[in-house]
Image: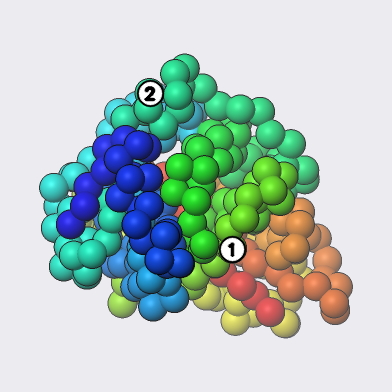
Amino acid sequence: MAICTSISTLQQTLSQKRASGAQIGFVPTMGALHDGHGSLVTQALAQNDCVVVSIFVNPTQFNNAQDLEKYPRPFEQDVAFLNAIDPEIVIFAPEAADLYGGAVQAKSYRFGAIESAMEGKHRPGHFDGVGTVLNLLFRAVTPTRAYFGEKDFQQLQIVRKLVALERLPVEIIGCPIHRAENGLAMSSRNRRLTPQQLEAAPFIFKILKKTQDEFDSKSIPALVREAEAAFAANPMLDLEYFEIAATDNLQTAYRKHPSNTYRAFVAAFAGEVRLIDNMGLN
């Protein structure tokens, strides 16, 4: 298994594959890999001749220094995880200075209305960091296709906007949320949950599913009120936001329009661990 720790070694590794006309699939990650990442990698393998997986904890997308410090980094386990899927996967694990080419700082982007909602509202500067690192990664890997899970649905829309703004020749593939049997969305942050918190966390999925089931019969304000009341009665989870938004522009919705599709979005804390999830409603 090739492990590239610099842009130059990555490009040397990929040069022969490109010379033969190989299509390159790319799965950007921050490590602490789980079956959700595995599903992205498996899809990438099925649709491309070669797959690159980046493992890089990007400092510019964290607005909480403690969260960055505590983010899990089990690199050897991640290598073994990917090797078990396919030993031909290329791992790109650069140092920040090499990837950023000097000063590690985010570029300022104008992503429009989608960046000011939900995650953008609660995590100032987050999407500038995401956009910056993905622009750098896309330029280093130059993939044919890149794969992102819909758990970070707002990020997925930001990535599509980034590709248009930077005129990058990469196809962005959104992939379904990978869930545990109890409905909990797979996340690297789940590793930080205590056994009690891990047992409580599927409540998020339960409320999303209830909202989906009742979407046709209740108004949007009523659904939001009920969800907020349910979280308020749960001592294990501290709700940051619960919103229903139009899928296309992610603006908060207050009434339904027949031509629109909608998703429910939630962010909640289990202790110090912040969990996000979402679900299509119609």
**Image spot of residue 264 (x, y percent):** 62, 64
Marks 1 and 2 sit apart, C-alpha to C-alpha, by 27 Å
Q: Residue at x 19, y 45 (%)?
A: 75
Q: Amino acid at mark 1?
A: Glu
Q: Classify 167 as above or below 20.
A: above
**Image spot of residue 99 (x, y percent):** 41, 32
Q: Which residue is mark 1?
A: 171
Q: Residue at x 21, y 52 (%)?
A: 2
**Chain-order first, disc 1 or disc 2:** 2
11 left or right of 215 in image: left
Colour scheme: rainbow
Q: Classify 93 as above or below 1.
A: above
**Image spot of residue 6 (x, y percent):** 32, 35
Mark 1: few/some/many CA within 10 Å (<14, 14-19, 20+): some
Q: Classify 276 as above or below 119.
A: below
261 left or right of 50 in image: right
> Which residue reaches farthest top?
103
Q: Quadrant of the N terminus?
A: bottom left
Whether residue 193 appears in this view of the structure is no
Q: Amino acid at mark 2?
A: Ala
Q: Nearer the viewer, residue 241 or 31?
A: 31
Q: Residue at x 65, y 46 (%)?
A: 162
Q: Quadrant of the C terminus?
A: bottom right
Q: Which residue is mark 2?
A: 97
- Element assignment for label 2: helix
